[in-house]
Amino acid sequence: MWRFFPQKNKYVQEEAEFTFDSNRAIPKHIAIIMDGNGRWAQNRRLPRVAGHKEGMETVKTITKHASRLGVKVLTLYAFSTENWKRPEEEVSFLMQLPVDFFDKFVPELIKENVKVNVMGYTEFLPAHTQDAVTRAIEQTKDNTGMVLNFALNYGSRAEIVTAVKDIYAELKKKDASEEEITETLISDHLMTGFLPIELRDPELLIRTSGEERISNFLLWQIAYSELFFTDALWPDFNGELLEMAIAAFQNRDRRFGGLKK
Ligand code: FPP
């Protein structure tokens, strides 16, 4: 946190130290913007895609760690509707990643009782990516533990536009009035609408790599999320850093617009 000191007319970055406590509240839904794969690779003079490959290993580590901590939903931003602008070679590598990931990791996901879901405009993904996703969802559908929710070809503004169009069509069909438009109805029509209502909105949003922006991710759902930014590049993110983010969450005073308890 950058604190402002008016006497010095200066911002100073404050060191905050929290200790993770597994007996305190664990966020039920954690969302992560996994950023910094490219820089991780460039720092090692490797091609950018090497960072994505290493990032995939971090996805495995964090999935297991989050599941064991008792997180109920882990939403990972794996590919945005804007990522198509990247060089073709990088896009095709990113489209192959879910295939490799699910092919190798599904047995472990089953062992961990993790259920896979994918949200986004998946119909525009290449057939091999769609097939891998469909298979993983099918293979883990009976699991009852954490939901591992990949945002793939996802963009929040597009998601909201789609939801509004669907709501408009439904209301028109029923000849219903605008009075029926409520926050719950909108939430029902977003891509997180498949989750029970109390789990739809992340309690904690993490972004790695030192960037402090939201980049069109879950704009509606993060209305009251706690935000945690870390300099760590995604391939360097690990269980200990996840616990640090949760420790910061545990020390926040969540008021939801009300007053301190
Ligand atoms: C952002 O880093 C990362 C991405 C656009 C892709 C994220 C994908 C993974 C972490 C692997 C996903 C794994 C599965 C199983 C789908 P960046 O390339 O923008 O990094 P930079 O900002 O340093 O260039």
Image (cartoon, helix red, strand yellow):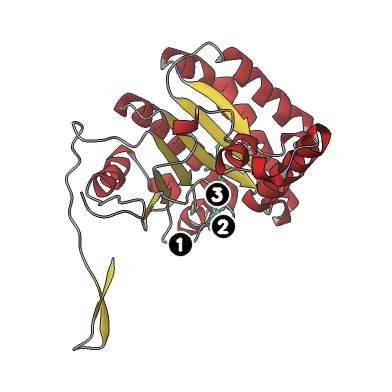
Mark 2 or 3: in front is 3
Mark 2 or 1: in front is 2
Beta carbon at label 1 within 8 Å of ligand 1? yes
Please provide percent x and percent y for residue 125.
75, 37
CB atoms at circles 2 and 1 under 8 Å apart? yes
Which of the 4 image quarters holds residue 144? top left
Res 5 label: none
Q: Quick one: 110 or 95, which is closer to the camera?
A: 110
Which of the 4 image quarters holds residue 210? bottom left
Q: Which residue is mark 2?
A: 215
Q: Which residue is mark 3?
A: 220
**Left of 180 or right of it: where is 1?**
left
Please provide percent x and percent y for residue 88.
75, 50
Residue sitting at x 69%, y 55%: 86
**One can see residue 60 in this view:** no
Residue sitting at x 39%, y 32%: 61
Residue type beneath disc 3: Trp
* Element at label 1: loop
Please provide percent x and percent y for residue 220.
55, 49
Q: Which residue is mark 1?
A: 211
